[in-house]
Image: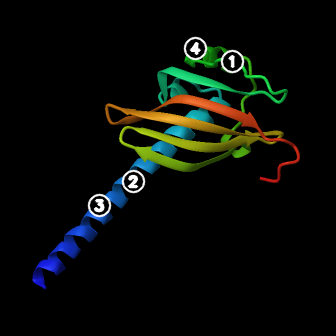
Amino acid sequence: MKKIITIIIVSVSILHSNAQLKSTEASAIEKTILNYIENFFENNYETMNESLHPRLAKRGLNPDGTISDDFPPEKLKELMLTKPKFAVKHQYNMVENISVYGNMASASLRTGYPKARWTEYIHLVKLNENWAIINVFWEFKKREDKN
């Protein structure tokens, strides 16, 4: 009986430890994604770039059904020099569906500003104990969607 109780206690401790680790990883991933999108909207390239892998692949589905141009980090920097800024209070950013396997993760980001909304599917890689966004694919919300 003592052996069974010991096994149960060890098992519960391991499960609790794994849950804490997953929660910590999910929090770090969410922070990475929010740093990326909030600073993208505010045109803070250097701060945003801290969340990006140098080989970032970013593209999306245009409203007309075509695939957008690629936006590697340097092209994002050029774009940010020409687009309007949107303060955090005018942004809509919700990170959801975080899934982690080893040193890779995925999440979805519902985002936008007052007159435009879209969802981004994001892949991340963990290198040197830090999460970095390596892939982004987005699609604009259709006007008839309620979500």
Q: Is residue 90 above or below residue 9?
A: above
Badge 3 element: helix
Numbered label attached to residue 79? 1
Q: Which residue is mark 2?
A: 22
Who's the residue at 49% across and 38% down the image? Answer: 32
Who's the residue at 55% across and 29% down the image? Answer: 135
Residue type marked 4: Glu
Q: Which residue is mark 3?
A: 17
Of badges 1 and 2, nearer the viewer stands 2
Badge 4 element: helix
Q: Is residue 20 left or right of residue 132?
A: left
Q: Earlier in the sequence, mark 4 or mark 2?
A: 2
Q: Earlier in the sequence, mark 1 or mark 4?
A: 4
Residue type marked 2: Lys
**Residue 10, how many percent across, how many down?**
20, 69
- How far apart, in angstroms, are the residues tagged by discs 4 and 3? 40 Å
